[in-house]
Amino acid sequence: MSDAALVEDREERRRFNESFRPDRYDALLSDLDRMTSAPPGFRVCETPVFLSVEFSRVLESAAEELVGLLRTPGFKVHAASAIPPGHSVPNPTEHTLFLQIDFAVARLPDGTYEPRLVELQGFPSLYCYQVLLDDAFRKNFGIGDEWTPYFEGLNRSAYLETLKQAIVGDADPAEVVLLEIEPEKQKTRIDFGATFDFFGVRSVDVSAVKRRGKRLFYHWEGKEIPIRRIYNRVIFDELEKKKPPMEFRFQDDLDVAWVGHPNWYYWISKHSLPFLKSRFVPESRLVAEYSSFPPDLENYVLKPLYSFAGGGVTVDVKAGDLKTLKHPDQFILQRKIEYIPFVETPDEASKAEIRMMYLWDDRPRLVNNLVRMSKGAMMGVDFNKNKTWIGSSIAYHRRS
């Protein structure tokens, strides 16, 4: 595509911007606060993204191509070295249950615009919060029924039923826990609240879990409740940093079913990037693989393999930094992506990352999406101070 405007549907963008009023946005935020007991800990964007038919097809095609690469025997060979020593969890599943593929909307050297892979994760995302966000946008901004955030013909109810089956299955929801470190303090707590509201699955702190033999339990209103399934939301670099008191270790052989087996946090991660060879993937290599570094390091970013949400990323890379890395096998150099500001706003245009969200039961199914909007050098809040029309959002595409 050679015209940035073709990334979004021009008419719907015009309609939305002309009808936008600050009081409608305030009402959206108020609704999100009321929809669950845990309000969002992040900024919610004033607008969704309205993908054009053409760009939506390219985005889905890019995601499916990468999913295909993850299903090859070669990927399993590559992923075998992804888990740090001592971090493997027993009884892994044959495939991940959750898969996130993050794309930037990027400008290529020839002036065209395409999705470019930022990173991917074999880990849950905000599957329930995105339903609330869709509800709030529809209520307050009159999003038409011809627009949907869902894929494969799913609607809201079918999506939630599919998600419930993945998380709860046939278990008693009380015996399924969303496991986190101090869940009430997490920025994503609104998703935890929505998970309980939709499915009856409680958020439980890792320090509140009790162990007897191979069994785990938690207490609720004076009752001891067995844990049969763990919907794991623990980020392992946070676990390493905080070291909360725990009666169990992830590496123990426990009598629980993992909803999202922890090993996939490592197997499908930034560690995967050097393996993925596609026109949609920027050049990526482990630092340890270089005999000499590229002369144009200003065109690369340095990423630690095992951080989350952009932690530890170095944009201004120097050769001296690379030479002094203690663990060069735990960092990658990735060629920079030129994000294109394509969402028209009342002042400057916004850039976006679009996360394609999968559930993988008998096969990987694209079910929903998530968007992060930015006007800064990077996507994080620190790079978007005093900006509007940035933050958490959702992408709509036309129903097929």
Image: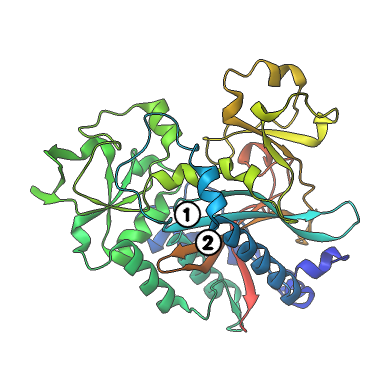
Q: Where is residue 3 in the image (x, y as percent from the top left)?
A: 87, 66
Q: Which of marks 2 and 1 is nearer the N terminus?
A: 1
Estimate the x, y position of residue 391 in percent, counting from the top left: 61, 51
Residue 169, position in %: x, y? 27, 66
Q: Which of 342 and 225 is in front in this view?
A: 225
Quickly name the residue at label 1: 125
Give whichever of 320, 253 is nearer the camera.
Answer: 253
Mark 2 residue type: Met
Given residues 271 and 200, the one toward you in this image is 271
The correct choice, above or below, for 221 with respect to 212 in the image is below
**Residue 291, picture quadrant:** top right
SS at badge 1 = loop
- Which quarter of the picture shows residue 47? bottom right
Query: What residue is shown at x 53% (from left), y 77% (from top)?
Result: 152
User: Eyeballing the image, is 346 above or below 254?
Assistant: below
Q: Which mark is on residue 357?
A: 2
Q: In the image, 264: left or right of 3?
A: left
Tell whether label 1 touches label 2 (CB within 8 Å): yes
Q: Please, which residue is most extreme toward the left here?
A: 223
